[in-house]
Each structure stands twice: as structure tokens, then as C-alpha cells.
């Protein structure tokens, strides 16, 4: 979150071209900083807020006098910030018999104010609810004492919600929740309050202004409509293509609980009208299997409006999803655990909101809560029906077109790879990758540590282990090739497997170039490959064909002399 | 931290918060000398200084200083503790 100073500096920037909104701010404490923060945050979110700030503690006069400056200004939206400190001050002055009625009396004045603002001035109202102060007069017993301040305050907050639910032009900004999140010590700084009359600390102003702007944005038609979901390690733990349906983490398996809770949240969004779409690098049957068969899946296929599973880059798939749904990019949120995919989408489709999901899936939910992505101005009964409508639409359109220039993106990644023979340092990881890779695995031979030791010594085998790193990080050892010398100048690719995390980056081409340069140097004339189908490696069925091999019986043949280096943007590094 | 360092750091906070490049604080500088240094900016400055030095001023501190020198003394005193 931007800090207050940053927001202040925004005030000097060029607001032309931003959407103008006439906003009034009425407060019973000093609001100058709040007004600056609102205007500065408005700039961040694309609004030129034209703000009328009422003089300090003039709420009633401005609201109930038809000739006041407020009426002259004619705000579209009015923010009303009555502080808990003033509320407490008022309560403190009451005689004890009136405590009990305090909330009712307060609500009475809120309702009068709302009817003047909504009714006479025709402005929408954003009312800040009350951050809690426990005056500790009763201790926890305040909770069972109807006339305690805490009891009355919470009653007001509850009554405010009831009132807002019945009055479409009266909105609440949940200040109380902000205090819960940042803590009271951050929310309120007594020394500043005493010296300036401001009850919001400088540190909390960005949070408060951001939450207010979210409401203003929603009222101005800026809200999210769709969440696009990755699957592996986003919706469940593990990789469905490699681990299989029994081993992905959901429910009580591994850290499955976090994914189950995450799915429940998504299901609630769907029920309130947010469209869910899937965009996954998988074969479609593999990707759909958990939705159909896994007992712990919360989301099912009929929760998903558009289901896209293929090996095309995700930006192109999102363009496709957008065309099916016919909504703006700025209404879409893309959730993916993989920084590569996130950055590809961010770079290609800058309007799509791409949250920087935390590394630990256990943190997904709290992080997403904090972004407050799904602010809305209204909800309707049709919202819940939306998914069905789009599912039908999705059936009608299913063409694949490529739109973005992936080369530019790959080039910008500054990818580097080291290729080296098996050795005692990389052997454990080679063994592990060999056991785990199911999808990108041409012959699915598994190598144990003993096999690897044997291969290192074998005069008829040549081994390659590839690493990859790019500007976002180091992916470690991600691909392995084992070559076997055959009769008369032929190299047979005994096995080739790769982690699916690095698909579509030109790693296949880089590996192929490496094999070829080895073959040339050692005067082999042809390369032979073979694809051995399993239930899980459909992905690489056309692998050799794509690389220019010619089919010959059960094998694929490539003439070394005819090979031209494949284009790729990975630089070879020496260890 | 030497007193001069504190003054230098406070000076750069003033430049940042008041968004004004030509500020050269001395012990004698007071709010009268810098137009942008009004009561509101004063609060912002104080909070920025608190954060920078990881200290907290009391509500009395905030009102007590006649000039920059007294403010720096107050910061140094807190840094000693």
C-alpha cells in the first residue's frame, strides 16, 4: 500500500483525463489529511475527486440547511465520518438512565441525516461505521451489559448495517474492520489526536482512503466480474498430470485444507455472481478429472463458466475467455501461483488484475481478503444465474487464435540454462525428477540412484541435466536427457523428461540444440527418438514431430546434417 | 549518532515532506521561516521523524519546541535512552 506522503505527492500530478467525481467530506473531527489522502488515492485509481470539505464539526449545519455550501456544491457522493471519539464524548455526558437509549438516539439522527442527504440533496452517502473503543468500565462484562458503551457502539454498527441494507443510496465504509486488521495502535495515535484533532493516524490514512475509493469505484461502475483460475498448486496442491487424482492435496491430504478453504471462498464469489473461469496448462480430460471425481473438490464443473485447458500461452487463452464472456479486461482477476504466468499476463494484458499470490498457499486467502477486490454497488438475483448463461456462450465459441507476441516476452526474461552430465551433486535431483515426471516424459523410464551411478560410468551413454533460471528466479534442475550410442553413427534418445513448470519457454528447443551440437561434435549422423504412450504423457505425443523428426516405424528419425538450430531465447551458461 | 547527522536527516525529511528543495535547517530555524511548515505539516513532519528514528514523541513534546534546535535536542535525548 502506498504511504501517505506518496499520496500527498500525487496531488501535484496531472489529473486531466481522469474521471471527475464531486465528493463532499463531512467530519466531526479534523479531516484535512483524510481529504488529501482521498484525492491522492483517487489519482492512483483513476479518479479526479473534486472535494468539498466542510468546516470542522459542521455536519448538522451543512446537512440540514438548504442554503449551505454543501447544497450549493451538489456532491454526487458524500462521505460522512463521525468518529468514535466524539461518540464516546457524547455518551460520557449522558446521565446513566439515558445510556440504554444511546444507540437508538444516534440511529435516529443518522436516519434524519440520510433522508436529508439522499432525499433533498440526491447524493449517495458513504458513512464510516465506528471503529471500536472499549472504555473498559465493565471489562468483558460490557458484552452482557446493555447500557455499556461497547454494547451501544456495536449495536449502532449493527443497526447501521440494517439501515444500509434497506436504503440503496446509503453505503457503509467498514472502518471497524480496518482497525481490526491494522490494530488499534496503528489506527489511532493519541499524541497526534491531542495535537491536531485527527483520529486517523497517518499510517492508516492510505487504508481508509483505499477502502473508500473502492466504494466510489464500484458506484462508478468499476468492479470485477470474473476470476480466472490456474489449477495445479492454485486450486489444489500438487500437479494433477504428474501426481494423479489420488495424490493431489485437497481436504485432509497434506496441506489440502488450505485449498479447500480457498475453493469455498471462490464458491461464495460464484454464488454472488462473480464468473469463474479456468485457464490451465494441462490436457482437458486431465484438468477436468478432479472436478468430476475428486470427493474433496468444492468447485464442480458447473461452477465454471469457461474451462480452458491446453498448452497455449495463458495470455492468449485469457483473450479467448474475454471474447467468450464479452467483458472488459479491467473486470478480470487472474490467480496463478506461477510468477512466470503472472508476469506474462501482466505484460501482455496490463488491464487484467494479477495479484502477486504469496508463495505459501496457506497465505492466499488472507492476502486476497486484504486486496478487497470484489467491492460492489449492488447485487441482484440474476447475478447467481450468470454462470449458466456464459457456459452456453462458451460452447458456441471455441476457436484458438494466437494474439500476443510471445517472443518478446521470452526474450525479456533473460533465461539461462546450464547443461552438464550426471554427477554426484545432481544425481539426487535427477532421480527425483525421473520419479515425478509423468506428463512430459517420452518413454517414462525411471532412474534410481543406482541406475544413475551406472549411467555415469557407462561408455555407451551420454547424460545431460539441464537447469533454468530467469530474472524471476532459479527453477533448478528441470530437464534430463539420456542418450545411448547405437550402431553406425546413431544416437538414441533413451529418455527425455522435463518439469511442466517450464513448459512453453523454448526449453525443448534449447535441449534439442544441445543434443544436436553434441552429435555434430562427435560425428553422429542421425538421432533416433521414441514416444512410449502412457495414461499421462499425451502432452508429448507429437513432441518429435514438432521438432522436425520423421516417422520411421515405431521411431522418429532426424538427420544431423539437415538440422537447423531451433529458435530459442535461452542462453547457455557454463557451470 | 552525532547531533549533526540527526540535523541532516531531519533536513532531508523536511525536504521530502514539505516537497521543497531549498531547505537548510539550523538550530534557529522556526516555523515562521518556512512558509509550508504550518500546523498540519507539523504533524506530518513529526510522524515522519518518529518513523525515521523509531522513536515516539509525547503529546507535550510536540508543542514544546520553539525552533529546530530544541526539536533536535529532543530527538537526541530519545536516541540516547
Image: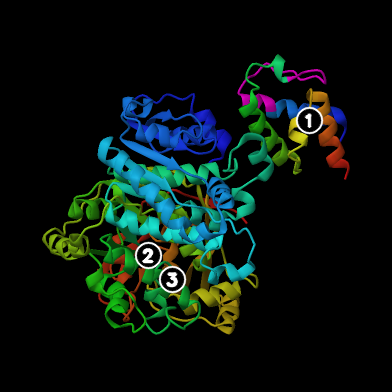
Check if mark 3's residue and mark 2's residue have beta carbons within 8 Å: no
Q: Main secondary structure of the magenta part?
A: loop
Return the x and y of residue B16 as percentages of the image width and height: 64, 27
Which residue was labeled with disc 1? Answer: B64
Chain on which label 3 sits: A
To which quarter of the image does residue A120 belong?
A: top left
Relative to A179, does residue A458 appear above or below in the rendering?
Answer: below
For numbered disc 1, what is the local secondary structure? helix
Other residues around mark 2 within 10 Å, as few (<14) / some (14–19) / many (≥20): many
To which quarter of the image does residue A527 belong?
A: bottom left
Does B29 lie within the magenta span? yes
Respond whether the residues carrying marks 1 and 3 are from the same subunit. Answer: no
Residue A357 visible at all? no
Other residues around mark 1 within 10 Å, as few (<14) / some (14–19) / many (≥20): few
Which residue was labeled with disc 3? Answer: A497
For numbered disc 2, what is the local secondary structure? strand
Find the magenta span and give its range: B14-30
What is the number of the mark on residue A526? 2
The residue at the point 71 percent across, 20 percent down is B31
Distance between the alpha carbons at the discs numbered 2 and 1:
87 Å
Distance between the alpha carbons at the discs numbered 1 and 3:
72 Å
Other residues around mark 3 within 10 Å, as few (<14) / some (14–19) / many (≥20): many
Respond whether the residues carrying marks 3 and 2 are from the same subunit. Answer: yes
Relative to A400, does residue A302 appear above or below in the rendering?
Answer: below
- Answer with left or right where residue A124 lies relative to residue B62: left
Amino acid at each position: 500500500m502506498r504511504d501517505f506522503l506518496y499520496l500527498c505527492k500525487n496531488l501535484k500530478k496531472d489529473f486531466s483525463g481522469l474521471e471527475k467525481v464531486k465528493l463532499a467530506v463531512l467530519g466531526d473531527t479534523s479531516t484535512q489529511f483524510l481529504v488529501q489522502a482521498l484525492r491522492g488515492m483517487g489519482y492512483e485509481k483513476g479518479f479526479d475527486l473534486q472535494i468539498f470539505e466542510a468546516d470542522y464539526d459542521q455536519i448538522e449545519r451543512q446537512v440540514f440547511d438548504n442554503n449551505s455550501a454543501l447544497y450549493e456544491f451538489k456532491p454526487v457522493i458524500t462521505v460522512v465520518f463521525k468518529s468514535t471519539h466524539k461518540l464516546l464524548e457524547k455518551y460520557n455526558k449522558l446521565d446513566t438512565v439515558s445510556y440504554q437509549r444511546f444507540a437508538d438516539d444516534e440511529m435516529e439522527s443518522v436516519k434524519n441525516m440520510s433522508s436529508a442527504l439522499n432525499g433533498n440533496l440526491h447524493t449517495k452517502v458513504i458513512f464510516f461505521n465506528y471503529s471500536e473503543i472499549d472504555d473498559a468500565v465493565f471489562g468483558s462484562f460490557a458484552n452482557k451489559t446493555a447500557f455499556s458503551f461497547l454494547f451501544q457502539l456495536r449495536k449502532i454498527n449493527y443497526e447501521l448495517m440494517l439501515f444500509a441494507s434497506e436504503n440503496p443510496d446509503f453505503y457503509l465504509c467498514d472502518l471497524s474492520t480496518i482497525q481490526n486488521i491494522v490494530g488499534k495502535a496503528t489506527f489511532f495515535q493519541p499524541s497526534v489526536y491531542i495535537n491536531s484533532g485527527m483520529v486517523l493516524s497517518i499510517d492508516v490514512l492510505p487504508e481508509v482512503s483505499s477502502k473508500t475509493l473502492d466504494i466510489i469505484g464500484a458506484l462508478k461502475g468499476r468492479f470485477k466480474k470474473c476470476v480466472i483460475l490456474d489449477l495445479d498448486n492454485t486450486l489444489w496442491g500438487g500437479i494433477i498430470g504428474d501426481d494423479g487424482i489420488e495424490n493431489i492435496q485437497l481436504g485432509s491430504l497434506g496441506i489440502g485444507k488450505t485449498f479447500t478453504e480457498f475453493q469455498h471462498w471462490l464458491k461464495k464469489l460464484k454464488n454472488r455472481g462473480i464468473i469463474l473461469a479456468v485457464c490451465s496448462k494441462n490436457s482437458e480430460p486431465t484438468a477436468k478429472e478432479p472436478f468430476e471425481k475428486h470427493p474433496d473438490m468444492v468447485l464442480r464443473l458447473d461452477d465454471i463458466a469457461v474451462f480452458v485447458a491446453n498448452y497455449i500461452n495463458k495470455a492468449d487463452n485469457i483473450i479467448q475467455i474475454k471474447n467468450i464472456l464479452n467483458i472488459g479486461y479491467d473486470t478480470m482477476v487472474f490467480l496463478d501461483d506461477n510468477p512466470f504466468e503472472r508476469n506474462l499476463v501482466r505484460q501482455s494484458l496490463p488491464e487484467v488484475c494479477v495479484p502477486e499470490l504469496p508463495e505459501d498457499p496457506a497465505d492466499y486467502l488472507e492476502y486476497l481478503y486484504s486486496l478487497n477486490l470484489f467491492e460492489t454497488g449492488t447485487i441482484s438475483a440474476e447475478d447467481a444465474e450468470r454462470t449458466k448463461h456464459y457456459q452456453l456462450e462458451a460452447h458456441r465459441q471455441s476457436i484458438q487464435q494466437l494474439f500476443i507476441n510471445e517472443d518478446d516476452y521470452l526474450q525479456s526474461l533473460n533465461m539461462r540454462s546450464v547443461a552438464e552430465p550426471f554427477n554426484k551433486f545432481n544425481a539426487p535431483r535427477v532421480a527425483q525428477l525421473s520419479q515425478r515426471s509423468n506428463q512430459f516424459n517420452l518413454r517414462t523410464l525411471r532412474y534410481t540412484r543406482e541406475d544413475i551411478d551406472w549411467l555415469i560410468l557407462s561408455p555407451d551413454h551420454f547424460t545431460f541435466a539441464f537447469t533454468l533460471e530467469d530474472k524471476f528466479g532459479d527453477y533448478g534442475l528441470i530437464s534430463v536427457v539420456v542418450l545411448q550410442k547405437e550402431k553406425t553413427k546413431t544416437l538414441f534418445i533413451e529418455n527425455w523428461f522435463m518439469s511442466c513448470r517450464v513448459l512453453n519457454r523454448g526449453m525443448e528447443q534449447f535441449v534439442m540444440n544441445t543434443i544436436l551440437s553434441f552429435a555434430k561434435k562427435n560425428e553422429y549422423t542421425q538421432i533416433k527418438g521414441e514416444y512410449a504412450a502412457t495414461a499421462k504423457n499425451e502432452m508429448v505425443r507429437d513432441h518429435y514431430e514438432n521438432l522436425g523428426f520423421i516417422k520411421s516405424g515405431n521411431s522418429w528419425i532426424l538427420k544431423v546434417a539437415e538440422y537447423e538450430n531451433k529458435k530459442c531465447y535461452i542462453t547457455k551458461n557454463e557451470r | 549518532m552525532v547531533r549533526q547527522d540527526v540535523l541532516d536527516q531531519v533536513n532531508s525529511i523536511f525536504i521530502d515532506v514539505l516537497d521543497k528543495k531549498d531547505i537548510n535547517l539550523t538550530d534557529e530555524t522556526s516555523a515562521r521561516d518556512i512558509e509550508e511548515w504550518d500546523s498540519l505539516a507539523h504533524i506530518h513532519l513529526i510522524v515522519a521523524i518518529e518513523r525515521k528514528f523509531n522513536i515516539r514523541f509525547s503529546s507535550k513534546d510536540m508543542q514544546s519546541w520553539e525552533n529546530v534546535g530544541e526539536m533536535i535536542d529532543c530527538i537526541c535525548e530519545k536516541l540516547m535512552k
